[in-house]
Image: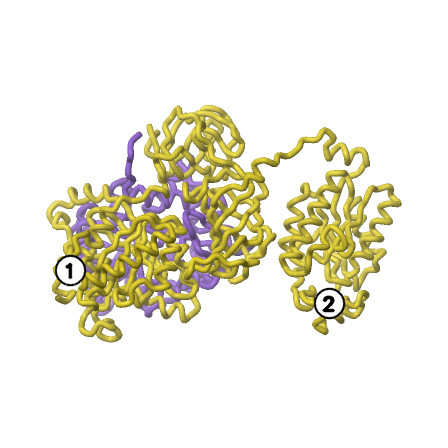
Chain colours: A purple, B yellow
Amino acid sequence: MTSKTLTHLQRLEAESIHILREVAAEAENPVMLYSVGKDSAVMLHLAKKAFYPSPPPFPLMHVDTTWKFQDMYKLRDKAAADAGMELIVYQNPEAREKGINPFDHGSLHTDMWKTEGLKQALDKHGFDAAFGGARRDEEKSRAKERVFSFRTASHRWDPKNQRPELWRLYNARKAKGESMRVFPISNWTELDIWQYIHLEGIEIVPLYMAEERPTVERDGMLLMVDDDRFPLREGETPVMRSIRFRTLGCYPLTGAVESTAKTLPEVIQETLLTTTSERQGRAIDHDQAASMEKKKQEGYF
Amino acid sequence: MTTQDQDPIYKTDALIAEDIDAYLETHQHKTMLRFITCGSVDDGKSTLIGRLLYDSKMIFEDQLATLEADSKKSGTQGEGIDFALLVDGLAAEREQGITIDVAYRFFATEKRKFIVADTPGHEQYTRNMVTGASTADLAVILIDARKGVLTQTKRHSYLVNLLGIRNVVLAVNKMDLVDYSQEVFDRIVAEYTAFAASIGIEHFVPIPISGYMGDNITALSENMPWYSGTALLPHLETVEIDSTKEPKAAPFRMPVQWVNRPNLDFRGFSGLIASGVIQPGDPIRVLPSGKTSKVARIVTYEGDRAMAVAGEAVTLTLEDEIDCSRGQVIVAAQSPLEVADQFESTIIWMDEAEMVPGRAYWLKIGTQMVSATVQQPKYEVNVNTQEQLATKTLDLNAIGVANITTDREIPFAPYAENHDLGGFILIDKMSNQTVAAGMINFALRRAQNIHWQATDITRDNHAAMKNQKPAVIWLTGLSGSGKSTIGNIVEKKLARMNRHTFLLDGDNVRHGLNKDLGFTEADRIENIRRVGEVAKLMTDAGLIVITAFISPFRSEREMVRQMMQPGEFVEVFVDTPLEVAEARDVKGLYAKARSGQLKNFTGIDSPYEAPDAAELRIDTTQMTPEEAAEAIIARLIP
């Protein structure tokens, strides 16, 4: 018998798999929220491992805003097919009808497409547990977030009504109508995610790697002109720059960084040497201080 | 020396820039250490955590810029950086009434990834600290060098030891404020050594530090040449992780989480290995059923494995088709776990509503969920003085020792042997809240020596002889709602139909079987439990039992329902508004309750929880007792 010591990634992996299986065993109708980003990619990969040789016993759901990068839509459909999972794409019909977009509607864009869209999608399908790819290291306010986060029947996060989580014991019991959001990769850091993607050869959206792409500089952010819906302001002309993205969302809201890192190790290298934190590239967080907390209460996560 | 000029040795690995592939290769082999920091803000806890994050380069430039600005604005360190600001920000949330159990922080060095459980706040401290400590491999107990060993130091140490953390660091902080005095340090260590031994901490590592100045954090400080031990971070990087959480040398145990059944040809059992190692061909036993087989394959996404160890999440297939489902435990065949249904356990109460002895709660241990009742605690422990106090119940943040009875036998290990198989949570059946954490100390002998006596005449025989289907008609409602009157008519009617019945009446039972019980919540629960057991025996004898008890709590009615065979429990809600029942006041009890002569009277100063889903509801303002009895019989004999 050998005295094998598990590495940190093996421990994180085992913990995530354990969480995924607990939900599959105890929830009536779980779903995995899939945003096509690198964290979602890792979460999906872990789900494949947790239930192998069965396919994950729940569908994937993308709450779409219609404003994601083209490359994200391509990978989304492929990843679901590869995993043998049903893919549910939900677009808030009201947002679609009103033509809500990030250029004209500011934070209403996120409210309508994402926050409202998610609630509608969960209600429509009657999901009682939704996996999300949030991590505790992303932001100061998330450090205290639980792995199992309970929501009232109206999807509100009631901060006074959350449960202590001890050992590996998660209490998944809930009343009819209540639901939970579950974050299996809570304890992973950005570097863990990158290392794991590298080690496991997980397919991610090519936008994470540097390439020459058409860009404009606006309000201190470097935005990519991903399609012709991008309204150029006076004096703006798209300039080809070697850029990549550290996080992915709606393309008009996601800032790029100038980079020459074309391979995954180079990206990791840059990440390690970088001096700004990850979420800085997202316009959504700059809206107001403590915006995360507010969005959570509204049901964004 | 200021913090800014100090060049943190953990800053950036030169290898990152030179050879990223080599760097990644070494970093894939990092191990992980989870630790908890115990102390209050005054001990410099936040400063220490902030310092660790900073020195291990987990702080980015934008965060540092914010930190520097904030330090000038609201920091307490003059021109220096206030590291505490990196991890604070919880105060505001506390003001908003948000419950914060534990905040988790992450940092990594070249050797290890660290997860720090930080438990803020003074109130709720026990609950929070126990939660944080439950997953920790190591505890850093902080002491302010100027203050020495305080009551709170003792409380933290007691909890750390209670949760079974064997690696303890005593960080004597703020050494810069006592002139880096060896004498001060030695005196504190001596005092702590005596205390630690008294509560069972056999070993701890004392380190003199200054979180603010950075002394003995990443490297030994020139300010304390007298200290010859290891600096804090190098100690955390190299300390051997105690293995009681996942002992590999112990026999194999794996709670089954999920049965993996993609098609008819594959049946696997998925779980996280709680202890030991397993290889294909190893003989195993499934508990509590006791069935045996051998491991056929260890299946993972990467392919079949030749071996798996404690801490890994795997899927096992067996050579034989034996019954095995979620909640059962697969163990090494030659060294099975104990199986029992009564335990002595240590319980930490975590809910605003106090523990109710005798009430049934859900108990989750490993992957099993069973119904369990907690008896009146043997004693409560004062966490500050470690004295044992007599108590009838446990309040929020109280720690006590009590016996627990589960509704079926469960495989387990004492917590001291294995945390996954001996640690449990209690869940309130109505609110679904996690109300307590517990640790099994040992099984009670009583359970092991009393076995069910198999009898030749079965309950089916008894029922067949009487030519009827046994049932319990459970009448619940306020005092004076008409339960006894209706029950009496039901029994007379059934007797005329040649049915064998028995009426258990609340007042009558209290003259004999339950005359030792009063009207407190705990006594009322025990009253109902006994009536439930009697009713159960009577249904075993084939009788139709009619009961007339106020039975005000949903949990207890649910408990009795669970005792009976499915379909045999008929809950009848005798629904009479309080005003009506009080106006009737047949026994004059409401008048006494209103005048304060009678305490804990249901509807007046003790609640009545109306049924949500009773089989039958009788509205006595609309129906006569005669009509009510007809409705009940129609429900019973369609």
Q: Quadrant of residue A223?
A: bottom left
The quarter of the picture where the N terminus of chain B appears is bottom left
Q: Quadrant of residue A200?
A: top left
Q: Residue B124, relative to residue A185: is it above or below?
A: below
Nearest to N terminus: mark 1 or mark 2: 1
* Mark in the foreground, 1 or 2: 1
Element on which disc 1 rests: loop
Report whether A182 appears left or right of A288.
Answer: right
Name the residue rendered at 73%, 35% in the picture: B459
> In the image as oriented, which residue stretches furthest toward the left?
B18
Q: Kindly tell me whether residue B59 is visible in this rendering.
A: no
Mark 2: give few (<14), some (14-19) or many (20+) Cα within 10 Å.
Answer: some
Q: How many marks?
A: 2
Q: Kindly tell me whether residue B216 is visible in this rendering.
A: yes
Mark 1 and mark 2 residues within 8 Å of each other at the beta carbon? no
* Distance from Cα at disc 1 to Cα at disc 2: 75 Å
**Who is closer to the viewer here, A44 or A191?**
A191
Element on which disc 2 rests: helix
Q: Position of residue B501 (x, y in %)?
A: 81, 44
Name the residue rendered at 56%, 36% in the picture: B448
Residue occupied by mark 2: B578
**Who is closer to the viewer here, B525 or A189?**
B525
Q: Residue B576, relative to residue A174: is it above or below?
A: below
Which numbered disc covers residue B224?
Answer: 1
The quarter of the picture where the C terminus of chain B appears is top right
